[in-house]
Image (cartoon, helix red, strand yellow):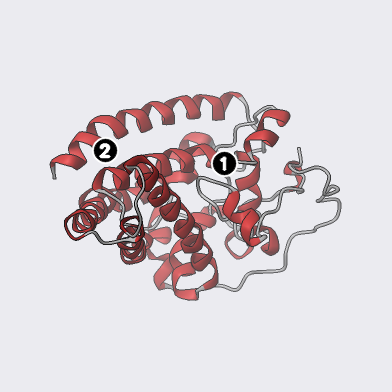
Amino acid sequence: MGIIRRIFDYKGTPILVTGFALLFWADCSYQMRKRKQPRLVRAVNNAIVAIPAFTLLRFMFLPAMVYLAKQNEKKNWGIIHWFNAPPLVKQAIAFLIMDYTNYLWHVLNHKIPLLWRFHLVHHSDPDLDLSTAIRFHFGEMIGSLFYRGAFVLLSGASPSNVLYYEIVFEGATQFHHTNMKLPYRLEKIMSNVIVTPRMHGIHHSQVRHETDSNYSVIFSWWDRLHKTIRLNVLQDKIVTGVPAYSHIEELTVGFLWKLPFMKIREWKQDVGEENRTVGEIHQLAQ
């Protein structure tokens, strides 16, 4: 479809590639958490794991979303067609609906065993940095097609809105997965609006109730709305990954591709929680 090439390929892809390069430099230069694996080895492994998922994103997911959005335009489907408002306001509302429903999708990926099988590939990364942002199983992409497609129809989003949302979605995912140490005061302010590296680092903790928090992708408001936000965990106490999959040597590309189709191990005893948190007055622990 021409609109995908015009918006996502010619505009979005250069922006995302440039952003990835800048974030990679920042990730290397301003490290927040200590690494368990060599950076290059992880980056290569995670990139290979991601190839099927990103192929599906470009050639199946995006065309399907754009097709559904075109039906919205042709048949006036979706919430934004139920009232009169300037086009920009309507598209902003559709953008927020897509982001909110992606928050809910993320929650479902943690709560429904079948979905967790695939999302586990992402969370099993023993480190957390920019390359984790692309470490997704292709099965998760297929599953999201049906869910996210339904809410494209519900929102009434236009084809261009769907594509611009995806660009922002991918950029936000890159940003909050970095191991970049931003100035504390700056990140504390930013976390009131968007998901930041410290905030998402808590979500990748091996402590289960910390993992089951901070589900938002772009805007942090959804976690605040549903009281799933957690910001008072000391960053140097976070151990990332999934306890039952903590043996780095087994997490090969082949193992990760077949992981959702194997018997899933139970979440082991949480790592020690002593001295992990600070008072609630510290909205974003250093």
Judge from the rendering whether residue 128 lies leftward or rightward of residue 10; answer left or right. right
Q: Is residue 90 left or right of residue 174?
A: left
- What residue does disc 1 label? 194
Residue at 61 percent across and 55 percent down: it is 223
- In this picture, residue 250 sits left or right of residue 261: right
Is residue 277 visible in this depiction of the protein? yes
- Quadrant location, the C terminus: top right
Above or below 282: residue 258: below
**Tag 2 residue:** 8
Helix, strand or loop status at disc 2? helix
Q: Residue at x 35, y 29 (%)?
A: 15
In the image as oriented, which residue stretches furthest toward the left?
2
Which quadrant of the structure image shows residue 72?
bottom left
Q: Report the number of discs.
A: 2
Asked if residue 31 lies left or right of residue 137, the reply is right
Percent from the top left, x then y, of residue 34? 67, 38
Type of residue at label 1?
Ile
Mark found first going from the N terminus, 2 or 1: 2
Task: Residue at 49% x, 45% y: name it.
Answer: 132
Mark 2 residue type:
Phe
Question: Residue 28: x and y, percent?
Answer: 56, 27
Residue 61 vs residue 6, the one in the foreground: 6
* Residue 44 found in image quarter: top left
